[in-house]
Image (cartoon, grey):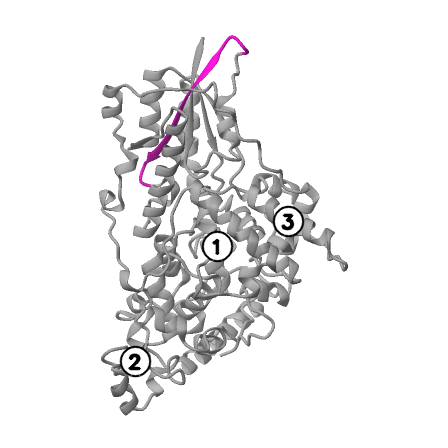
Amino acid sequence: MTVNNVLWFRHGLRLHDNPSLLEALRNDGGRSESVRLYPIFIFDGESAGTKLVGFNRMKFLLESLADLDRQLREIGGQLYVFRGNAVNVMRRLFEELNIRKLCFEQDCEPIWKPRDDAIVNLCNSMDVKCVEKVSHTLWDPEQVIRTNGGIPPLTYQMFLHTVNIIGKPPRSVAAPSFEFVEFGTIPSILAQEVKLQPIQNLSPEDFGIYYEGNPDISHQQWIGGETKALECLGRRLKQEEEAFLNGYFLPTQAKPEFLGPATSMSAALRFGCLSVRMFYWCVHDLYEKVQANNQYRHPGGQHITGQLIWREYFYTMSVHNPNYAEMEANPICLNIPWNEAKGDSLERWKEGRTGFPMIDAAMRQLLAEGWLHHILRNITATFLTRGALWISWEAGVQHFLKYLLDADWSVCAGNWMWVSSSAFEKLLDSSSCTSPIALARRLDPKGEYVRRYLPELKNLPTLYVHEPWKAPLDVQKECGCIVGRDYPAPMIDLARASNENANKMNSIRQTLMKSGGDTPPHCRPSDVEEIRNFFWLPEDVVADC
């Protein structure tokens, strides 16, 4: 007898370290039954972050699905991709194919709960076994919350303490053998009814999504899929090993590189093309290997993979908070009276027309390539909120969610709340902010990054490249870049705005302290060092205005 099981891909677009895949291949009825597998993905307008998605991110997702389909075809199957409501698609599959079991990876963020609850209810009503497995996160966020007494840990250090009680995250599960796996086929009539899509031919334009960046300044092409992710992992591990051999870790943080090929694995992790558990243990095992041959051994720990732990922390903080990405209804977020965007100020920030080169270069890189270094994300976010424009972080979240390859709801919103001093920050006591001019001089001293993404400034002398408005008019004419015509003049007086904003923050803080007495119960860092680590600022970077 053969039973029919469905493996539903949402995130987790990979075959390695996929507990849901193993479960879908598992024979629940004993040796007398064999399994016929149906791997599927459903474009329901929301899954995998498609509710708000730009060209580069949709392209990455489609490439990831095509890579998965190609791998499955090599072993006799294929990925069935549908468009429509997930419940409706599942109901028809269950009815026509006599499905016995549905398996999928946990999407822990609360925005997915209505979808998953509806699917679970459907399974219960149609006598289909429904199995959810945890592998998109290192630890099960629900277990973290239970271990912390039923509430999410409010500080990063409290989170570390909690997961240390739980123990180390599990290692990757073994890859399955597909030697005797039978793959199911979808009857043509049913395929037409549930809108089966030929994934190899799909493009962002098929979804009404078009490129909005400048292709002439796009220098890095990100390619989605498990195959590419594992290839990039090898290069990233070599970078990690070099850092360990030279006595440091977190190489992309310790030595930020804006011009060379980025080695970030964040997009692959966001779509699950790379297992976070595999990445975590590859790095930690490599560290132990290097330390074993080191005369002066340094202890390992979670700090070796700090970026992954921050990811876990933000996921956990969002699990029971469906209003996590907004301000007023969000219990962990302070309600700061941000200004309404005046005129085209928000659009100028989005399009890279603020008149401040480091901000504009970063925002244009985002539109062109879909990615920014973490430091650049913080600089541009600070500029939009407390550093300059005093516009709500909610507008920034929406823009980043649409255009960043690696943006997911919880991590993106968590970052924005912290940078804007709305949460994950001490009680509005940061009177300083990261100046785009000061940091530009420190991180891009020759102006190479700015010139790459703002070609209109390419001929300006280095002395003026970060402050082109200070260049004498004859220099501007000679370089073919007149400020106010060829490149925007600064949209605000930055020194004045940052000073006014710091005073606003201090006034709000004093009001809260007088009315409430104690610090309101919003998330905050454990210490100053944690703030520095979050902003990825080396010790010699001055973060003032």
For the residue pair 544 and 517, the one nearer the viewer reads as 544
Disc nearer the start of the sequence (1/2): 1
Of residues 202 and 74, the one drawn nearer to the viewer in this rendering:
74
Q: Main secondary structure of the magenta part?
A: strand
Q: Could you tell me which residue is drawn at 67 percent across and 41 percent down?
A: 166
- List x then y, in percent, for residue 40: 37, 29
Three-letter residue code for mark 2: Ala
Residue mark closest to the camera, 2 vs 3: 3
Q: Earlier in the sequence, mark 2 or mark 3?
A: 3
Evaluate whether residue 214 shows in this view.
Answer: no
Q: In the figure, is residue 135 to the left or right of 2?
A: right
Indicate the secondary structure of the residue bearing disc 2: loop
Amino acid at dot 3: Leu
Q: Amino acid at mark 1?
A: Ser
Q: Residue 57, can we see it? A: yes
Q: In this picture, which residue range is highlighted in magenta?
A: 30-45
Quarter residue 529 falls in: bottom right
Rendered image: mark on residue 77 = none
> Horizontal placement of 63 versus 239: left or right?
left
Q: Report the Cα–Cα distance between label 2 and label 3.
A: 49 Å
Residue designated by label 1 = 264
Please rate how many residues cluster around mark 1, counting C-alpha atoms within 10 Å: few if below 14, some from 14 to 19, many from 20. some
Q: Residue at x 53, y 37 (%)?
A: 135
Q: Residue furthest right?
A: 295
Is 42 contained in the magenta span? yes
Q: Judging from the image, what secondary structure is the residue with disc 3 in?
A: helix
Residue picked out by circle 2 = 489
* Front label number (1 vs 3): 3
Q: Which residue is mark 3?
A: 286
SS class, disc 1? loop
From this view, report whether residue 65 is shown above or below residue 523: above
Question: Considering only order in the chain, which callout, 3 or 1, is on the residue closer to the N terminus?
Answer: 1
